[in-house]
Structures are given as C-alpha cells and as structure tokens.
Amino acid sequence: MIVYRPRETGDDARMPGRNRLDYAQAYKKICQSARQRVLGDDSLDTPAAPGGATVLILVTPDVDSLAATRIFTQLLANDEIPFRVSPVNGYRALQRVLAQDVYDHIELHTLVFINLGSLLPLPTTIPLPPHCTLHVLDSHRPWNLDNLFATSQINDRIFIWDDGEIDERLYREQEAYEQLEFDFESDSDSDVSESDAEEDEQNGEVRSDVSGSQESGPSTSRRQKRMHKSDEGRERKRTRLDGHQRQIYRTVLAKYYARGSWTGMSVAQMMYILAVALGRGDRDNLWYAILGLTSQYISNSIHATTYDGYAAALASDVVAMDTTERVEDGQSYSTDKHGADDSSVHVVNQELRFTLYRHWSLESSMYHTSYVAAKLGIWREKGINKLRGLLAKMGLSLANCRQTYEHMELDLRQSLVQRMEAIAPEYGLVDLTFRSFTRSYGFRTVPLSASDAVQGISALLQAAHGVRIEIEGVQMVRADPGISGPRSIDRPVGTYGTRTLWSLADSGIDIGKRPGPMLSIESEDPEDDEENSVSATWVKNFFEAYTAMDVQKPKSISLLQLSLQLAKALHEAIVSQGVSIIIKQSIKTLRSFRLAVLQDGPSLHLFVQPDTLTRLGYWLIDALRDIVGEKHARRAEAKRARRGNKGDDPDQVSTPQNLPFVLAALDTERDVFVVVGIVGASDYGDVSKNRFGLAFQDAAQASGARMRNDRFESSVLEVRRDDLMPFIESLHLKA
C-alpha cells in the first residue's frame, strides 16, 4: 500500500480518497496500532518485544537517516509510543535483527525501515508477525515494483511512503505491472464446465442440464460460486494480452530497472513534511530536514537544481519561524537573537563552497576543496602558486590566510564573499557559492553551518572509533568516566600546535549499557562475525553520530564541535591520497571506465570504509574532469588547425568523454578488496544515474569471482584478493 505525500492547500489540491493514505493518516495508524496490546496465548512460548517496544525502527548509518530518525522518534516520544532504534548496515545485519527482534514477537506492532528496503522483495523476505505492519521510507531508487503494485494480503500490511515520484512519474510502470500481473492463459469454457462437473461428482451432487430443474440449497450456492469463477475467467480472458502488448509492457519494466540507481527526496524531508502535517513543525525538525538535504547535496547524490528547489522551500519555512517575539502565559517577550539561549536557524544566501572554512585557515580550506583543487590543479606547484596568487589579488596576506577564520580581521570576513566573486572567475571559479543555512547554539559554541554539521556527523559515522588517525592539536577536554559526581576530573587529550591521535575512548560511551529501550542492544554471541555483531565498531560510530545530532544537550553540541577536527583529518587523508594517485599516475583508463587500486599507503585503513572510498572517488572525478577537458581542448585545437589547412569545417569537435570510476582498496585483515563504482557528470553539480550495480553482478557471474554484496548500495561490493583482476577484466569486457 502506498502512502502519499500530503498535498498543499489550494484549488488544485487533491483530497485523500478512501483508500489513499497520506503521511499524517499513516502515522496515526502507527500510533493507534501501537496503543493496542495484543494478548498472546500463555501456552505459546513466544518472546516479548525487547523493552516492551511496539515500534522497531531500523536505520542505515548515514546523516539523512539519522536526521529522519531524530524527527520520527521525537514525534513518537511526544505521543508516548514506546520504540526502539536498531542500526543496520547491510543485509546480514538486517537478517540478524529480523531473526532476533521481529520473528515471533507478537507485541511488535510496527516495523519501520529508514533508508533501506527499496530494492528488497519485502513480501517474501520480511517475516512480519501477526498484526504487525511495515513502513518503508527510502530515498534509494529504483523501487522494487513488487512492493508497490503487487496485490496480495501481505502487501496490504506493507506501507511504502511516496515522495511524489510514484504518484506523478510511475504511471506507465504501474500500468505495465498491473497488466502483466493479471495477464494469464485462461481456460476455455468447456474446460470450466468439465471442471465444474468433476467437482459436482466428487461432492455427490447431481446437476440437470434442463433449465428450471430443482437443486438443493448447498448445491445452488456452490453453483453460484462456480458461475462467478467462470464469469471472472471469461472477463480475464477478454483482457488477455497478445504477444506484442506483453512485450511492450515487459520492455517498460526492463527499462525502469536498467536506468541504474539514483536518489529521491531526503527521508528527513519526508519526516519534516509529516511533522508539519501533524502541526509539529518546530525549529529542531526543520534543522534536521536541512541536514538531510545538505547531506545529499555534498555527497553528490542529487542535482544542484534539485537542491536549490528544496532549499528554497526550507528557506521559506525558516523565515516563517524567525519571529522576534514569543508569548508565554499570555505575556509577550522579546527574543534576543544573540542571547545565551539563541537556537535560531538562519538562511545564508551565499555560502562559500570551501571545506569547513569557518573552522580552518582559508588557505587550507581552499586547498582541501575538490572544486578549487580541480580548477587550480593544487597537486602541481603551479596550482599552489595560482592559489596564493588568487589570495594575493583579493588583498589577503599569507598571514591572514594561514590563521584560523575566527581570528581573521573582521572586515576581511565580512567582505570575503564579495572579494571572491570579484577575483575568482579569473581562475575559472565561477560557482563558488550556494544557498545554505546556519544554526546558533547560544554561548555554547559559534554558529554552525549545515554543511559543517554534516561533515562532522559523517566523520563520526566513518571514524569515531576503531580508526587510527591524527588530528590537529586542540584542547579536547573530557570528563574522566571513572569518577562521577561534581568532582569529576577534566583531562586534556591534546595540546595546541601539535598532532595527536583521535580518540573517543574516554567518552564513557558503552553500547551495551545505554539507558532506555531506544538505545539498548543485546549482547551478541562471540562466535558470530565481528563485523556484523552489535558490538562492532560501526555500531558505536552510529550512536556517537546519533548523539552528536541532538541539538538540545550540551554534551552533544560539544561532541559535534569536536567532530569537526576529525572531519578535517579525513579531508586531509582524502586529498593526500588523491594527489598521490594523480602524481604517480596510478589511474588506468580502460574502454568504459577508469580504475584505481589502493594496495598500500599510510591511510589505507581509512579507505576500506566504503563511504570514505566513495568520497575519494568523487574527488578524483572532479579533478580529472578539468584535466580531461584541458587535454581534449588541446587536441581539438590541433584538430581544428589541421582541418583548417585542409579546408574542412573547423567547428565539428566532439565533446570530451566522461568515464565512470572504479576504485578498489585492499583490506589486509580480511584479504578482500572493497570495490565501489562511481558515475560522474560532465559538469560540476550534475548527477548521473549509477549503473554499476547490474554491471557488477554480470561481471561476477562471468568471472566466477568470489564476491559479496552485503551493503544496500548495489554499487559497493567486496571481492576476494585473488579474484580482483578476473573480475575487472570481465567488467571491462561487459561494460
């Protein structure tokens, strides 16, 4: 069953039909079913749901999912609905959670998937208990059409939340699916009559062929049922498709799946739409929606024009909530926007596209920005000189550029955007700004932009625990968890001007001892695979990021501020590795894609994480886009000169070919290569659909490579070390 996005009020607004659920109605059904307690039979040995939670939320470890979970759990908490959050990072983790927390749990009323489930055949893979419904909110595309349009009893308990795409764009696919679903080879009328006669003989009944003959009551009832079946068969026979129509509909479905993978609306935005429909669209929920949208944009998941449209809509909500007065107990109070309790969200119409520039030096921020690196070629000495020349033309000395942004002169900070827009186009930097948002945290910390917050939370998801990485020396003060109470001892982890290892070991976070049903996790069998157990590192990283996203607790805000140091260290590692790949010419250009294999290096352990490896791939795509463009321009100029001498048309020049990218990083501990496939676009800000999922499957089958695709992203997989080259050869031949 499809849950449709609420329509805006107006003349063209469509009222929800009898069988047409919107977000608010679906949420009310969740609350209603959660309040109903199913009484199990005492004779049945059926375990209860963990912590008595009637709503189980399965969440993937990404910023958009965390933001959506924050909104959804806040709504459930306000309605006093017990719930539990469980992270899943792949299919094996999903199977473990389903086996432990879903199967045979009669108290479980609602199962919610956040950013997973779009491609899974849900009716056959999810063992829903009785009276339990499944709600799927996923921004990954394409959809498994069986989940959307199939007609079955189990599908009536599966609710797919639509962001508008199903309702507005999939009408052709829906028609094709429904026509093929009810297309069958019906029997002839004589076959129906013969089957009816055989059934009568088996039941000991006698039928007369003469009209008006008398029959018993039960026989008459069965006769009516058989006549109904016969009529239904004749009706379906009349709508049977011929071979040509059947092939057309199958082609429509095949083309839909062959498009590749892409990303729809942020699930955090969908949850914010739900909050607004319920009348609970407050500032915190709006900020979470902004974080979800920003995470999609800076991770190259959505097109720049798509981001601009959604950002404009959220900006209008920010302006609507930016009131200068508040009313309490009938009394009006003025709001001080710069006070200790200021938590306002502001729109920044011109946010510089520099990495963490408010928390870094301007020179370092520009150096570690992929857009600037690609345009200036910072891996060459000439590119470094261009960068410094740009800053000099802006009237900035090296002393100003190399100190942190907050210590720069005030007039330079206020005029930085205008200076950049005046000088940067001379160096090809014509797309330096975009619309963004900032949030204030009172006197606790400086205001954070949405992109900075997303960078910090992403860094916690990737490297909060279990990764050895050096950060800039800062005075990170943590309370000693061994001493409780007001006499706790603060211990510095690093000092200014030095490099220190990142560590959150003293944070006192223990996954097995988290309070409350939402964050409690059962202990796991030590014989299970460590990477998928609930005590694995990625689970700790998930809850660190989940904690840092809380906008109310001072501890969470401090953790978010500290995460920016980790984000800068990750950017340094990515840029350093990318520059090394380009300088060493480690990229192989094949017929249909480019290949880079990482087998050694001081930061190799960072890139076995698929998200970090994907970020490296996008950095290389941005850098190579201009390199390939320059080479193509030189070749085109030479071709024009030759054609001009021969009298040919000099304007016929082909466009440069933008090849996809395949990166493989060696995980020495498990003796496997982590492989990701990335599709870039010809212009900065564009997004292309990723077809590597189908290509990887075909290559694995053709080569016989031992591979595993455990993640929900089809373009990420693991290949045994000895099978990588045969896999790449098959991918090269079949792509």
Image (cartoon, grey):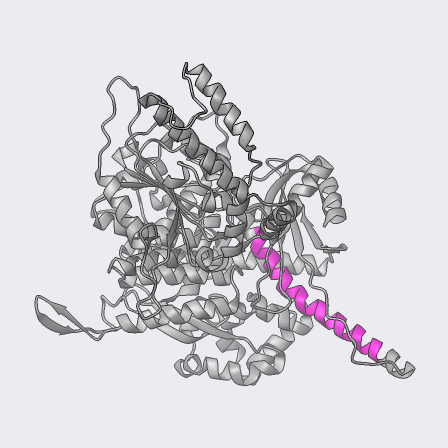
The answer to if 4 sits in the magenta stretch is no
Q: Residue 67 is drawn in which quadrant?
A: bottom left
The answer to if 631 sits in the magenta stretch is yes
Q: Residue furthest left?
A: 330
Q: Main secondary structure of the magenta part?
A: helix
Residue 494 visible to an observer of this rendering = no
Left or right of 181? Residue 342 is left
Q: Is residue 700 above or below residue 115?
A: above
* Total numbered labels placed on residues in the image: 0
Q: Is residue 679 above or below residue 694?
A: below
Left or right of 124? Residue 243 is right
Residue, x 50% and y 84% (percent of image)? Answer: 419
Nearer the observer, 99 or 136: 136
- Residue 676: x, y in percent? 61, 49
Magenta region, residue range: 613-640
Residue 290 visible to an observer of this rendering = yes
- Residue 564: x, y in percent? 43, 59
- Residue 428: x, y in percent? 62, 78
Q: Residue furthest right?
A: 646
Nearer the observer, 367 or 174: 174
Nearer the observer, 465 or 524: 524
- Residue 116: x, y in percent? 46, 45
Q: Residue 624 is drawn in which quadrant?
A: bottom right
Nearer the observer, 579 or 439: 439
Q: Residue 42 is drawn in which quadrant?
A: top left
Left or right of 620? Residue 17 is left
Q: Is residue 216 above or below residue 441?
A: above
